[in-house]
Image (tube, rainbow, N blue to C red):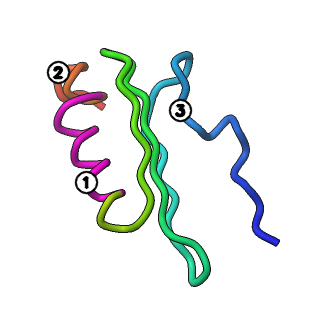
Amino acid sequence: MFRKPPSDLYPTEEKPGLRVRGGTRYTSSQGDYVCGGCGAEDHANGDDNVKALVEDYTANHGPAHRGGRQ
């Protein structure tokens, strides 16, 4: 009934980045990241946890390793 997003949308060591999927009536929001600068990775479920994951990625990983450039 619910399809899983294509695997090429998930961040990997070869394609680092941030993925966020909003929740629906039947599913919770989800987020993943892999940092291209330090290799850190994380996963979160639920609105509050995904928000914290995005804040962590933004402050300490992806953009932080690029000097704030997107």
Relative to 1, residue 68 above or below: above
Residue at 45 percent of width and 51 percent of height: 31
**Which amino acid does the dot numbered 2 rest on?**
Gly
Mark 2 and 1 residues: CB-CB less than 8 Å, in contact? Answer: no
Q: Position of residue 58 (x, y in %)?
A: 24, 39
Q: Residues within 10 Å of mark 1 (few under 14, many from 20)?
A: few
Q: CA distance from mark 3 to mark 1?
A: 18 Å
Residue 27 is covered by the magenta coloring: no
Residue under pointer 2: 67
**Which amino acid does the dot numbered 1 rest on?**
Ala
Residue under pointer 1: 52
Relative to 70, residue 14 above or below: above
Relative to 6, residue 24 above or below: below
In this rendering, the label closer to the viewer, 3 or 2: 3
Identify the mark at residue 11; answer none if there is no mark: 3
Q: Quadrant of the C terminus?
A: top left
Residue at 19 percent of width and 31 percent of height: 60
Left or right position of 68 against 10: left
In the image, the segment drawn in magenta is 50-61
Q: Position of residue 37 (x, y in %)?
A: 32, 15
